[in-house]
Image (tube, grey):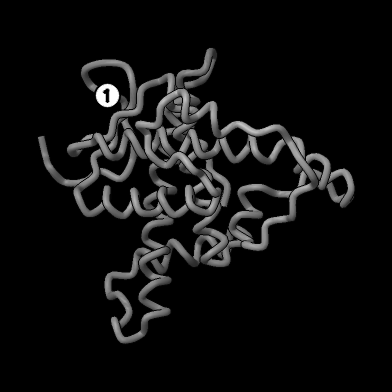
Amino acid sequence: MSDEPVWSFSRAGDGPGYVARLDGAGRAVLLDVIDEVLRLLGDPLTSPDATDAERWSALTIPGPPLEVPQDPAVRRLLPDASPDADVAAEFRRLTEDDLRATKAAGLRALRAAVDAGRPEVLVVPSEAGRVAAALTDLRLVLSERLGVRDDDDAEAVYRLAAEEEPPSPADSVASMRHFLAAVYAVLTLLQESLVGLMLEELPGAAPGRPGTAPA
């Protein structure tokens, strides 16, 4: 079996689930991105080894109205639920803690799968939905950092990621944008391939039904 990385999911050959082959550098970058998004969410339990008691102790009763996140990337993860400011504030007060916890749990599930992958990352069917949602959240954060607002912006990012000659290291801004574009493209391949496989397994789905992912 080749040791070359395969930046997309396929069906596991020896059992249920989905696998993607990542090299060591790819795993390290993906883990760093996951940890950064967990930090943005304010997740106090970034360790997948947290006990049930620790998770229960993190639960809180909704309190006073919450401030709208200042970081636009966090607002992409936790958007207003209504154009009405009062309705949006009340909905945020009642649901934001649970939404943060749900997203953090999905990111921890993805992190555990990536961290265990040597080199094949295995996602079991019961975790596939959470992992696909976590990949979407990673893409949302990077799309905000890269200024992706529509399909044209996304295509420009993919073209940047595909450039064979990276920017000069002396141009730190261009180098970082090229790096983020490459990570965004990889996340897109992983997310779309996983969602596509899940859709194919829905009752009545036609073989080869493609998955789609938001910009």
Residue 74 lies in quadrant: bottom right
Q: How many labels does the image show?
A: 1
Q: Which residue is drawn at 43% across and 61% down?
A: 158
> Could you say where residue 111 lies in the image, as x and y percent from the top left?
36, 39
x, y (%) of residue 54? 47, 30
Could you say where residue 192 lies in the image, as x and y percent from the top left? 45, 40
Mark 1 belongs to which amino acid? Ala
Q: Which of 139 and 214 is in front in this view?
A: 139
Decide which of 107, 184 is in the foreground and name it: 107
Residue 40: percent from left, percent from top: 53, 54
Mark 1 is surrounded, within 10 Å at the Cα level, by few (under 14), some (14 to 19) or many (20 or more) other residues, namely some
The residue that label 1 is drawn on is: 12
Is residue 186 depicted above or below 160 in this figure?
Answer: above
- Residue 215 is at least partly visible in this image: yes
Q: Is mark 1 on a helix, strand or loop?
A: loop
Q: Identify the residue at image location x=53%, y=55%.
A: 141
Q: Which residue lies furthest to the left in this view?
A: 1
Instruction: Residue at 54%, 30% (x, y): give it.
Output: 57
Residue 41 horizontal side relative to residue 86, left or right: left
Indicate the quadrant where residue 68 lies.
bottom right
Image quarter (top left, top right, bottom left or bottom right) of the N terminus? top left
Position of 162 compared to 70: left or right? left
Residue 86 is left or right of residue 10, and the answer is right
Q: Can residue 211 be seen in this view?
A: no
Return the residue nearer the eye: 191 or 67.
67
View extreme (top): residue: 203
Q: In this view, does 114 lie above or below 57?
A: below
As displayed, is residue 94 above or below residue 79? above
The structure residue drawn at horizontal position 37% and vertical position 34%, both measured from the top left corner, is 48
Residue lying at the far bottom of the rendered structure? 170
